[in-house]
Amino acid sequence: MMEGAVRLIGTYYVNKWANEWLKTFKRKPREGLPLLLSAPQPSLLDETQGSENFLDVFGNISRELLELMHYVNKHLKFWQIKAQSAEQDKVRFMMLERGPVAFVRGLKKVVQSFFLESSLTSGLLSAAYSRINERVTMLNTLRKRLAIIIGQVHLQVSKLEEKVDTGRENRRRGESRRVLSQCVIAILVSLNGLEGVYDLPQSDYHGHGDSNESRTIVLEFDRMPDDLMGGINWTDSELQAAIQLLQSNVVKLKEFLSDLVPYYEKPRRLVRYWLHYTGGAVGLAMASVWIVQHSRLGGSDDLGRWIDKAREDSYLFYERRLHQPLTAIKSELFDTFRKRRESSAQLEEVKLASDSLNRMVKEFVMQTSGLEVVSAASEAEMMRIVMSRYEQELVNPVKNLVSGELARALLIQVQKLKLDVEMAMLDLNKILRANEINFAILTFLPAFALFLILGELIRRQLNNKKGAEGRGRTAQMMRRMLMVEVEKGVMTCQIKDDENRGDDVSVEYGMLIYSLDQLHKGVHRAAENSGEWLSLRRDILDLTNPRLPTFYKLAIAERMERVYDCLAPMPSWT
C-alpha cells in the first residue's frame, strides 16, 4: 500500500516535470496587431450595459480575419510566382510537381500534342496558363474582399475612438451607443459583400479528376431584420444580438474558406517533391534489402560483426578521446596541488646545494687569495678566481693533487655540476608537467569540438524560427521587405484616395493593416531582444491610424528603418 502511494506520487511529479520541460519547446502563438482602442471606455460602458466585451469581439474578429488573409495570401503568392515564371518552369511544374498521376497525364498530353500540334509542350503550356490564372483570379478576389472587411473593422474602431474623445454633452445624448451601432452595421454590411456563388476549379490534382461541368459553392450569411439595419437607436439586447450575429457570420466565413481554399491552394510539399521522396524511398528499400542480406535473416553474420566493431570503436573513442584525457587533466591538476610540497622540498635542496657551493668557494678564495679579496669580490669573481687557480693546479696535477689545492678545486667543480643538474631537472620537471596537461587537452579537443557542433545543431533545430522572426541576414532582409510593403501600402492608400476610388481605398487600407500585422509579428522577438519593442510597437500602431496624415506616416516609416536595429540594414562583408 505504501509502495503504491509512493510510486503514484513519484509518477505524478515526474509527469509534471516532463510537461513543464516540454512546454519550453512549444512555440508560443505570435501576437498579432492590436486595435487602436485597446480597452473599453467608461463613457461607452455607461450607455452600452452588457456589451462591455465589444472590443474583445472586434479584436477577435480582426485576428481571425488576418489569419484567413494570411492563409489566402501565402497560396496566392505561390501562384503569382508560378505565373511570372518562364515557360519551361511552367512545363516542369505541370509534369513533375503535381504528383505521379499528373505526371502520367502530362506524358499523355505531351504525346497528344506531338501528334496533333507538332509541339511537345503546347498542350501543357495552355493547361498551365489556365490552371495558374484560374487560381490567381479566385485567390486575389478573396484577398480583396477580406482586405475590405479588415480595413472596415479597424476604420470603425478608429471612429469609435474618435467619438470617445468628444465632450460629455454628446455622450449624454446617446452618441456613443449610436456610434457603436453604426460600427456594427458597417462591419456587417462589408461582411455581406463576401456573399455569392464561387466557382470551383474545373480540374485539379486533389483527386477530383477532370470535369467540364461547372461546379460552384455558395456563401450565405445570417442577416438582421431590415428595420434594425436601417436604424441606429438600438437597445442593449439588440446590440448584443448584432454582435453575436457578427461572430457567427465570421465563423461561417472561416468554415467556408476552409472548404473553398483547398481547391485553389498550392500543392503540398509531399506532392511538389514526390520525385525526391520516391527516390529516397527506393534508396531506403534497396538499403533495407542489402541490410537483410547481410543480417542473420539472410544467413550472414556480417551485420553483427559490423555492429560489434562499431560498438568497440565507439568505446575506444570514448576512452581515448574523452575519459582518459579528462582523467589525465583532473589528475594533473590535483597532482599539481598535492606535489606543491615536493616542489618546495626540491627548491630547498637546490638552495642548500647553492649555499654549500658558495661556502666552499669563499673558503677556497680566502685561503688562496686572502680575506680582503673575499670581502670585495662578487660570487662570479670568486668563481673566476677558483677556475683560474684550478687551471694553474692542472699544470702539475700529480704534485698538486697531493700537496696542492687541486683536490679542493675538483670538489668545487663537482658541487657546481651537481647544482646545475638539479636546477636543470627542476626546470625540466615543470616543463614536462605543463606539457602533460597540454597533451591531454589537445587529445580532448577534437571530441569536445564534435560535441559542441552537435549541440549547436540540436539547439538550432529546437529553437528554429523561420521567416522574419528568426535571426541572421535572411530574417533581417525579410523584415525590411515587410517594411517596404508597409511604405507601399501607405503611398497606395493616398494615391487611391486622391483619385476618389473608394472601394480601392478600402482594399489598400486592409492590405496595409495586413502588412502591419505581419511586421508586428515579425519584429516582436527581435525588438524585445534589443529593447526596442515598446517604442516600435507604438510606431506600428501610429501607422494603422487612418486619421494620421500620409506625410507623418512616411516620416514614421523612414525613422523606423533608420533608428531600430531590428529593421536597419546589416553591414555587408566584402
Image (cartoon, rainbow, N blue to C red):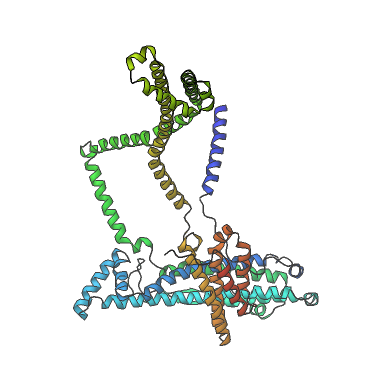
When the figure is inspected, residue 212 is found, relative to residue 454, above or below; the finding is below
Can residue 1 be seen here? The reply is: no
How many labels, in total? Answer: 0
Can residue 143 be seen here? The reply is: yes
Quarter of the image holding residue 528? bottom right
Residue with the most extreme bottom position: 499
Q: How far across and how far down the image is residue 105, in percent?
A: 27, 69
Q: Looking at this view, is 219 or 49 the one in front?
A: 49
Q: How far across and how far down the image is residue 560, in percent?
A: 58, 69
When the figure is inspected, residue 416 is found, relative to residue 190, above or below; the finding is above
When the figure is inspected, residue 26 is found, relative to residue 311, above or below; the finding is below
Q: Is residue 95 left or right of residue 258?
A: left
Q: Looking at this view, is 344 or 372 the one in front?
A: 372
Quarter of the image holding residue 261? bottom left
Q: How far across and how far down the image is residue 468, in percent?
A: 49, 63
Residue with the most extreme top position: 402
Q: Looking at this view, is 502 or 253 the one in front?
A: 502
Q: How far across and how far down the image is residue 440, in percent?
A: 40, 35
Residue at 39% of width from left, 22% of height from top? 390
Where's the C terminus, which quadrant?
A: bottom left
Residue at 57% of width from left, 27% of height from top? 2
Where's the N terminus, which quadrant?
A: top right
Q: Looking at this view, is 84 or 537 the one in front?
A: 537
Q: Is residue 345 left or right of residue 309?
A: right
